[in-house]
Image (cartoon, grey):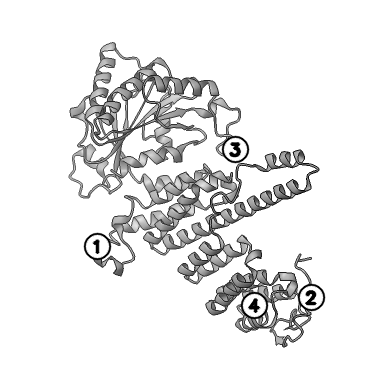
Amino acid sequence: TSGIPDNSANNSNNNNIQLHQLHSQRVSKLDEKTTADDVVKAIKRAQNLHDEHDVVEIAHFLLEEVDQSFAYGYRGSLLSRLAVASLHLQNYDIAKRCIIERRISHRSSMLPLESAAIVRGLLRCHRTDEAWEVLEDELSLPLEGSVQWENSDENSTQKKNDLNGDDELLHLEDESIRRRLAARDKLIHRARSISSIASRHFYEMEPTEGIKAVGKLKEMGGVVNEAGLTADDLGIPWDRLVKGAASCESKRRDGKWDNAVEGEDAASSAEIPSSWPCNIVYAVLDAMIAFPSENKDVTFEALCNALVRRTVFVTGAVDMEGCPEADRGEVAFIGRSNVGKSSLVNMLTNRKSLAFTSKTPGKTQQFNYFAVNDKPELARQIRYGDDVPGEKDRDSFYIVDLPGFGFAKVTQQLRQQWSDFMDEYLQERETLQAVFHLIDARHGPTDEDSKIMQKVGTILGAKQQAKEHCAKYIIILTKADKNVKNAKSQSNPGKVSNKVMEKLIETMKENRVGYAPIVLTSSETRLGRDEVWKYLRFAAER
């Protein structure tokens, strides 16, 4: 019933096996009549009851008594089970012997699931270097060109139907499918194993190694997407990684690594803060963006709590003199009225009222500055004029909510003032790192949107040509959920029609901003929030 082959008829090469007595009543001994199923039961019991004696006896049996043919080659899987059990009992010597023998004698039959279990066992024993060794040897990335990812299972089925009757070609196609499925399985377990390593480092307060591990995840992003794997296939615990990195960042803000050794003496210190991002969580975000999006609220809530710890309205500016001191990076959001600008800002920061939202278009009528991660109790200083001690955090930045166009019920004179202020702001605000231009995904760009593109294309294009600092320009398509029925956050979060997309691309080209990235979003289904944070971080990292 276990699915394990009975090797009792396959012991012709194992006739000189010595008797090994076990504590178990169910499997009391190991001898020439022992089956693979008996060994599995013995290993499980020894692991569950922490029976060191039985683990040693089973190791003698598998490593010294039986050969490769035991249980028709199932010995390799038994060795992996014994390795995990030995690690559970903190017996690394036996585990190491099992791992080496498995590689030497059973490499062709090693399963990714088994390798991943060994990695987790090594991590429990704090054998991180050995875990990396197993991962890179047994769960390595496929060689470039060795797997044909472009053939989906559906296409493969159709291709096999087309080849019906040609046995040789059918065999080659079957082999291609087998190789592709095996490579996908290895990718899944490699990604999960690396996430386990990263998590271990973060929760052990070893951010440098944790950052390196999530960097390895980021490097996998290309081949993971090429293989057609989904977030559900991979099952990466992003929320746990974010929380672990956030714990390290919290200790960092408390000064845990302020005296870490730098420069030539860095070898004596495992932690080198100068090599870290301004917020350690950004390293996890990089990997998240490289992988298929899962769009889960629990993950994004953890991300926002780590990246947006405090927000406060600083000032509303009507000209450059009214802008706060340019002492940190900032990002600006602009778009016609009723495009969902304030709702998007609130979604990105996981706040309900960071930016004022209203069913009455045109409520934002000044350049509203919001400080993110400034010093604690800054709001009290602004409101009452109290001298509050403290400094802004290293990842502090400004979010600037610009006036909406189109529906705003204002005079032509005020519109012109906004336009002139916008020109000056884009030209002179050196701390501006990104401009998010919001456009309704249902209708595409309007004449007002075209004017904004023209303004941005002219001003930022000239700065780029002059090799001056130039803010990143990003198109954000909002309200994508309105284009689908029964929109849901994961299965059906939103879309944009081909007609609207074609219109948008043409308008962008006409206004010399065809290079700008396009991000599809919805404040209702939370679509696109991780992608937008990819650019929001530019301000924090300035």
Label 4 packing within 10 angstroms: few (<14), some (14-19), many (20+): many
Q: Nearer the viewer, mark 1 or mark 4?
A: 1
Q: CA distance from mark 4 to mark 3?
A: 44 Å
State which tag comes first along the sequence, 4 or 3: 4
Regarding mark 2 in the picture, which secondary structure is present there?
Answer: loop
The three-letter code of the residue at mark 4 reads: Ala
> Residue under circle 4?
46
The three-letter code of the residue at mark 3 reads: Ser
> Residue under circle 2?
10
Q: Are marks 4 and 2 in contact (CB under 8 Å)?
A: no
* Residue 118 quadrant: bottom right
Q: CA distance from mark 4 to mark 2?
A: 25 Å
Q: Nearer the viewer, mark 1 or mark 2?
A: 2
Image height check: is 78 above or below 155? below
Give the residue at x 35% y 55%: 249
The three-letter code of the residue at mark 2 reads: Asn
**From this viewpoint, which residue is outermost toward the top?**
412
Q: Is residue 61 visible?
A: yes
> Residue under circle 1?
263
Give the residue at x 43% y 24%: 439
Q: How far from the left and from the top, in percent, is residue 60?
A: 64, 83
Image height check: is 212 above or below 4? above
State which tag comes first along the sequence, 2 or 3: 2
